[in-house]
Image (tube, rainbow, N blue to C red):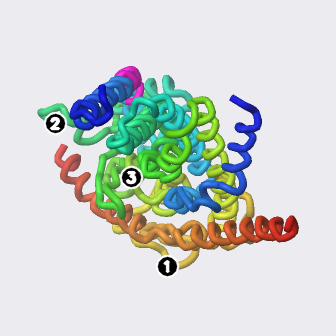
């Protein structure tokens, strides 16, 4: 796997081609899980695992997969890995599994996984596809973690379930509800786009 | 196989799909088979922890000690079909009953909420509450599973109502979860209907 290709994959997925603020994929889970930091971390780990393995599996099968059934095959592969994540959580991390509830199963519906399978894994070798899955997952994760830190801190006065802000702080309930997630995501995209546009203007 | 032949256009995709489905179903089945005993064990342990917590018994740190304590102090009262009707918690080193625990379900916002509700031996006041199963929104209604919410029910008496502002001052009041009125109301309903349910199940004994 050439190093320059790997570097480009990571630079793209963490930066200009980020799945959240550039491609605007995976927004449902971004809004749903980022009100609690612990749930966000588990969702991110689960997504990195599923995206990387799905990408690699789709890439391994790409030369044999008939185009007529490719989306069904991709959905089957993604669903299988998500089921595995769900089973493993129930068996070895039951408390986390209980807290996440239906959100683990909803990883199947995350557009990022299908999007990377279609856009990258179908036309790249397995090793690079695996790394693209990891890079996309990391790109998704840092955005979610940044939003989750702010939402849980302002919405519950805590981080990772531990009280941080004390009695002087009045919790902003809107931050743990859906509108708060929209606001935070919009602000994040606005800030990042502003920085990217400014860099482009300066370079020209 | 020619690219445009019937076999390549119609038969091969079906065969491929069937084959890949078989492979992945086999993989997930193996993983499920390998872990199902552990999952069942987790669920049984969870129920035992919930019963002890609802009865106000301090929970040990490790599962083995939880099992020992459960076997020592909890009697499962079953019906003719073997289904547990309620749990009777004995006093330490005594055959007399300290409290009772029932399993109660109610409608939450997104699905059913299942909880264990503990009563004193007279079925007059609550000893504890543990949420066994719920699908409420994490961070909002899901907070019914947090200890600060559950702990406030110890010593309260039905019928319960939410306190409009500030901390509860009455044994009939509890603090709701801001932004989760449906989930709070679901727990309120479960608690308020559980005394009658308990009296029906246990009161005749």
| Residue at the image position 77 percent from the left and 69 percent from the top | A197
**Magenta-colored span:** B30-39
B100 or A28: nearer the viewer: A28
Q: Residue B166 is drawn in which quadrant?
A: bottom right
- Label 2 – label 3 distance at C-alpha: 26 Å
Q: Secondary structure at mark 1?
A: loop
Q: Chain of mark 1?
A: B
Residue located at (38% from left, 68% from top)? B185
Badge 1: how crowded within 10 Å, few (<14), some, or many (20+)? few
Q: In the drawing, does residue A126 fall left or right of residue A157?
A: left
Quadrant including the C terminus of chain A:
bottom right
**On-image quarter of the N terminus of chain A:** top right
Front disc: 2 or 3: 3
Residue B134's disc is 3
- Which quadrant would residue B61 be assigned to in this image? top right
User: Neighbour class for label 3 at 10 Å: few (<14), some, many (≥20)?
Assistant: many
Task: Say which label, 1 or 3, has the lower sequence index.
Answer: 3
Chain for numbered disc 2: B
Whether the magenta-drawn stretch holds residue A203 is answered as no
Magenta run includes residue B34: yes
């Amino acid at each position: 796997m050439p190093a320059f290709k790997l570097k480009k994959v990571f630079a793209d997925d963490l930066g200009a081609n980020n799945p959240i603020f550039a491609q605007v994929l995976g927004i449902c889970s971004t809004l749903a899980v980022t009100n609690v930091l612990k749930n966000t971390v588990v969702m991110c780990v689960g997504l990195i695992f599923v995206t990387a393995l799905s990408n690699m599996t789709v890439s391994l099968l790409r030369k044999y997969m008939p185009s007529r059934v490719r989306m069904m095959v991709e959905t089957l592969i993604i669903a299988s890995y998500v089921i595995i994540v769900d089973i493993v959580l129930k068996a070895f991390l039951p408390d986390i599994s209980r807290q996440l509830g239906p959100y683990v199963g909803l990883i199947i519906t995350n557009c990022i996984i299908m999007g990377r399978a279609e856009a990258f894994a179908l036309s790249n070798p397995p090793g690079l596809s695996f790394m693209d899955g990891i890079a996309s997952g990391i790109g998704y994760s840092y955005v979610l973690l940044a939003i989750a830190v702010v939402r849980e801190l302002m919405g519950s006065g805590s981080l990772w379930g531990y009280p941080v802000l004390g009695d002087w702080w009045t919790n902003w309930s809107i931050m743990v509800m859906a509108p708060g997630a929209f606001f935070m995501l919009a602000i994040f995209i606005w800030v990042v786009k502003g920085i990217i546009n400014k860099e482009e203007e300066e370079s020209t | 196989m020619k690219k445009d032949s019937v076999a390549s256009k119609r038969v091969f995709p079906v065969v491929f799909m069937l084959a890949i489905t078989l492979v992945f179903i086999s993989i997930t089945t193996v993983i499920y088979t390998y872990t199902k005993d552990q999952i069942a064990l987790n669920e049984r342990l969870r129920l035992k922890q919930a019963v002890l917590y609802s009865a106000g018994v301090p929970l040990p740190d490790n599962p083995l000690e939880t099992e020992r304590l459960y076997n020592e102090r909890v009697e499962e009262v079953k019906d003719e079909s073997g289904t547990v009707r309620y749990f009777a918690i004995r006093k330490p080193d005594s055959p007399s009953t300290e409290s009772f625990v029932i399993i109660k379900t109610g409608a939450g916002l997104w699905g059913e909420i299942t909880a264990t509700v503990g009563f004193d031996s007279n079925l007059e006041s609550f000893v504890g509450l543990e949420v066994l199963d719920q699908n409420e929104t994490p961070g909002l209604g899901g907070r019914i599973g947090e200890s600060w919410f559950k702990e406030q029910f110890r010593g309260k008496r039905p019928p319960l109502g939410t306190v409009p502002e500030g901390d509860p001052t009455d044994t009939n009041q509890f603090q709701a979860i801001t932004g989760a009125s449906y989930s709070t109301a679901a727990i309120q309903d479960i608690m308020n209907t559980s005394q009658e349910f308990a009296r029906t199940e246990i009161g005749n004994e």
